[in-house]
Amino acid sequence: MILEIKGLSAGVEGNEVIKDIDLTVKSGEIHVLMGPNGSGKTTLANVLFGNPKYKVLGGDVLVDGKSILGMKTNERAKLGLFMQFQNPVEIEGLGFIHFMRTAKETISGSRINFKEFMDDIKSYMKELDMNDEFINRPVNVGFSGGERKKLEALQMLVLKPSIAVLDEPDSGLDIDALKRVASAVSNAAKSSNIGLLIITHYSRILSYIKPDYVHVMIGGSIAKSGGIELVEKLEKEGYEQFTGKQ
Ligand SMILES: Nc1ncnc2c1ncn2[C@@H]1O[C@H](COP(=O)(O)OP(=O)(O)OP(=O)(O)O)[C@@H](O)[C@H]1O
Ligand SMILES: [Mg+2]
């Protein structure tokens, strides 16, 4: 799959937040998007998934050459796109297994073998070091910040999308949890040829997931793209080189 973002501008509440973004992500590629707080990273993710709060002001988003901007979020998911939220919400009354099974069956368009499905979930939970009781609870209800991030990662592992946008999959995770989540995501990306766009503030996750491309977003635009050396430069010099702020 190829996800092409072409000259995309979008806003929220009457303000233009992202401006003229060009970015292409292919299945199997790993992209990292970094940038100061409020620079528009989460807005970009929301626009890619059709959150109705965000208005597209120009440009296009294509999957395998076809515009997806007219599609609803569930239709985008059926194409093989997946988004992990920066701030996953609690959903009272929705059991995780029911949620996951419905998502898996709807996206694949066929009934699943429940035993295989549960075995799959349990093996990923082991990989993520998650207690079995989590999946018997409603989605995210009463979960700690790190537990929510693990549950988001678990969803991606089970759904095996073609391209996934992960919005700060590392925030709030302790040192061991970060290693587990990042390694599981990296293994899945390799074995299922998943394309990743990982939004992060920290280079630590990149010890476990090696990016092919790194992009820096400043004030709603991609100010620079490069390889892993860009992260090293940012760690040393911060964003001042792009923002002009001292
Ligand atoms: N629903 C909204 N209503 C009003 N303003 C919004 C909304 N969503 C985003 N914005 C504004 O758009 C700008 C970009 O926000 P966004 O969440 O995309 O930043 P970010 O790069 O993800 O930041 P962070 O690194 O802190 O997560 C911010 O100034 C934010 O306040
Ligand atoms: Mg954000």
Image (cartoon, grey):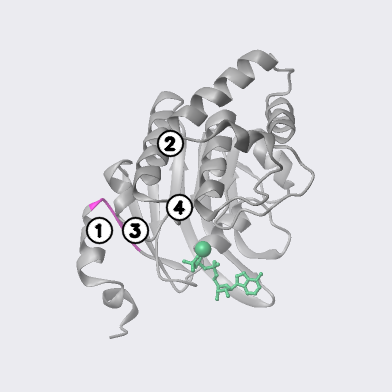
Asked if ligand 1 lies within 8 A of label 3, the reply is no
Label disc, if present, on residue 202 of the rendered structure: 3
Q: Amino acid at mark 2?
A: Val
- State yes or no: residue 226 in magenta: yes
Q: Which image quadrant for residue 12?
A: bottom right
Q: Amino acid at mark 1?
A: Leu
Q: Which image quadrant for residue 106?
A: top right
Determine whether, in the image, residue 63 is placed left or right of residue 235: right
Residue sitting at x 28%, y 86%: 246
| SS at badge 2 | helix
Determine whether, in the image, residue 24 is placed left or right of residue 120: left
Mark toward the viewer: 3 or 4: 3
How far across and down, in percent of the image, does residue 128 sit? 45, 35
State the CA–CA distance, disc 1 to disc 3.
Answer: 13 Å
- State yes or no: residue 33 in magenta: no
Mark toward the viewer: 1 or 3: 3
Label disc, if present, on residue 23 of the rendered structure: 4
Which of marks 2 and 1 precedes in the sequence?
2
Q: Which image quadrant for residue 89?
A: bottom right
User: How dense is the environment of label 4, judged by Cα within 10 Å: few (below 14), some, or many (20 and up)?
Assistant: some
Which of marks 4 and 2 precedes in the sequence?
4
Label disc, if present, on residue 185 of the rendered structure: 2
State the CA–CA distance, disc 2 to disc 4.
Answer: 22 Å
Mark toward the viewer: 2 or 4: 2
State the CA–CA distance, disc 4 to disc 1.
Answer: 17 Å
User: How dense is the environment of label 1, judged by Cα within 10 Å: few (below 14), some, or many (20 and up)?
Assistant: some
Which of marks 1 and 4 precedes in the sequence?
4
| SS at badge 3 | loop
State the CA–CA distance, disc 3 to disc 4.
Answer: 21 Å
